[in-house]
Image (cartoon, helix red, strand yellow):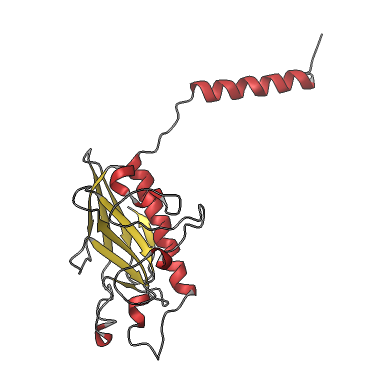
Amino acid sequence: MKKSFTLLELILMIVLLGFLYTSFIPKVKVSKIDDLTNRLVLYLKQTRYQSLINDKFSNSDNLWHKKRWTLKFFRCRETIGGIYYVIYSDKNASGHPGIDDSLKDSLTLKNIYSTNSCTENIKNSKYVLISQNFNIRTVNISCNETSSLGQLSFGSDGKIYSKLSANENDSISYEIINNCKIELSDIFNEKRTIQLESKTGYVYKE
């Protein structure tokens, strides 16, 4: 009697098991708000690492602190509605980041940037348009000290700042002392939270 499988039979068995697995095992689908949360965690980490290797301190520039690498949330134009974000270093300290100031996504090599027109184009990452692509309704940052939706800036020492002061003497006064939360809410009332630890700069999904 036959006591062993031939190579062809083993191959057919593996193919059959693979077919059964892909056909009948339920697939876990990541929701849009979870997708955004995961991306923001990665982008915040990328922003922090960029700050660690790209020190903006300068004895000859009184506004050097305005050039810290920053993730900032904005509202789209009123006629469009929605929310987007930009990751940038304001090279000219103008307070109005342009596409040349923005960080590139390390995977897609697209700019993590948009204008308030909130329209997609081939240069910019579509993932920054969080209302259009992720159904986000609100963003709340617990440590926000700006008149905008909020921003987070990282220093070369790993510290986090809630605001880029216009006053050189206040450049360290907006350092985040307590842990900070970014709370996301979508049109389906789903909510997610990202935590930032003030002492270490560690970022994670709650």
With respect to residue 177, does 131 lie above or below? above
Q: Most extreme residue toward the right, as rendered?
A: 1
**Who's the residue at 77% across and 19% down the image?**
8
- The quadrant in which residue 10 appears is top right
Q: Check the picture and name the quadrant holding the N terminus.
A: top right
Side of 162 where 90 appears, left or right:
right
Instruction: Please give left or right for residue 17 compared with residue 120 in the image.
Output: right
* Picture coordinates of residue 133, whole percent (x, y): 34, 43
Q: Residue at x 38, y 61 (%)?
A: 203
- Residue 42 position, x and y percent, is 43, 56
Asked whether 152 or 64 is in front, the reply is 64
Q: Nearer the viewer, residue 33 or 9?
A: 33
Q: Count up the numbered dots.
A: 0
Instruction: Pick whichever, 85 or 194, lies toward us.
Output: 85
In percent of width and height, residue 165 lies at 25, 78
From the viewer's perspective, is residue 180 above or below residue 205? below
Q: What residue lies at 72% left-to-right and 23% top-to-bottom?
A: 11
User: On the picture, is 41 further left or further right than 2?
Assistant: left
